[in-house]
Image: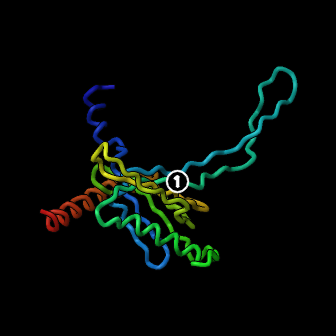
Amino acid sequence: MNINRFMNHMDSMSRSDRFNIEIRGPQNIRSRGLRCTAVTTPGKTIATTGKNYGGATPERPYVTGVEYENKITATFMLDTTFEDKQLFELWQSYMYDEAYNLQYPDKYHGSVKIDQLGVDNIPLYSVELHEAFPSNVTGVAFTAEATTVQTFDVEFSFRTWSSSFENSPSGLLGGLFNKKMRKIRSRLDKKVNDKLFG
């Protein structure tokens, strides 16, 4: 491969620091995850079992089921309002009342959407967690040894998840159309950002 072509291709590679997370909980709890510094999308494993038909033949794997991950952890930075921590603790309070009576799941289920962004800030890959809720909100650590920004973790449990790809195969014309639309959306986003923050 030509080194110049490879170096030009590097600009279009997916970057781990370009992501967005959108959280929707009960009672109009909403967060754009602006202070989220780390999150991992869930995976899926196809469970197999081997079957040997005798002799010196190798085992043949057969699919026996699907194993879904149903927990992810997101890390958030804390500002002086503790807004994100308040939000998730409020969400957890909807899961039980003061007498520790548990609520029905449909009262506290929400969704979490994680987007992998391209260099033009348009999503390339999206994962949505269904029937999600914060099953664990960690405490906040204090120390006099350093002056770093404080963080805390939220573990989300969920039932299922689904994914979508921006660049799904759709033929030559569909690919060209998607590419042109991405350029238009990118220009519009840049103009809006320039007006708002420029």
The image quadrant where one finds the N terminus is: top left
Where disc 1 sits, the SS reads strand
Identify which residue is drawn at 52% across, 73% down: 93
Farthest-out residue, left: 198
Whether residue 52 is situated above or below residue 14 in the rendered picture: above
Q: Is residue 114 above or below residue 102?
A: above
Single out the residue that lies furthest toward the right.
54
Q: Report the front residue among 179 and 11.
A: 11
* Residue at the spot of label 1: 72
Residue plotted at (60% across, 60% down)? 160
Q: Nearer the viewer, residue 132 or 53?
A: 132
Place of residue 10 in the rendered image (x, y in percent of width and height, measured from the top left):
30, 36
Horizontal side of residue 75 vs 103, given as left or right: left
The percent coordinates of residue 163 (x first, y second) are: 51, 57
Left or right of 103, for residue 48:
right
User: What residue is at 30 percent from the left and 55 percent from the top?
Assistant: 121
Q: Is residue 170 visible?
A: no
Work out which residue is located at the far top of the displayed protein and give it.
56
The image position of residue 67, as x and y in percent, is 66, 49
- Number of numbered labels in the structure image: 1
Q: How is the image coloured?
A: rainbow
* For residue 108, above or below residue 189: below
Q: Is residue 60 left or right of residue 197?
A: right
Residue placed most toward the observer, 10 or 167: 10
Residue plotted at (30% across, 57% down)? 182
Residue type at numbered disc 1: Ile
- Residue 1 appears in view: yes
Spot occupied by residue 198 in the image (x, y as percentages of width and height): 12, 62
Please rate how many residues cluster around mark 1, counting C-alpha atoms within 10 Å: few if below 14, some from 14 to 19, many from 20: some
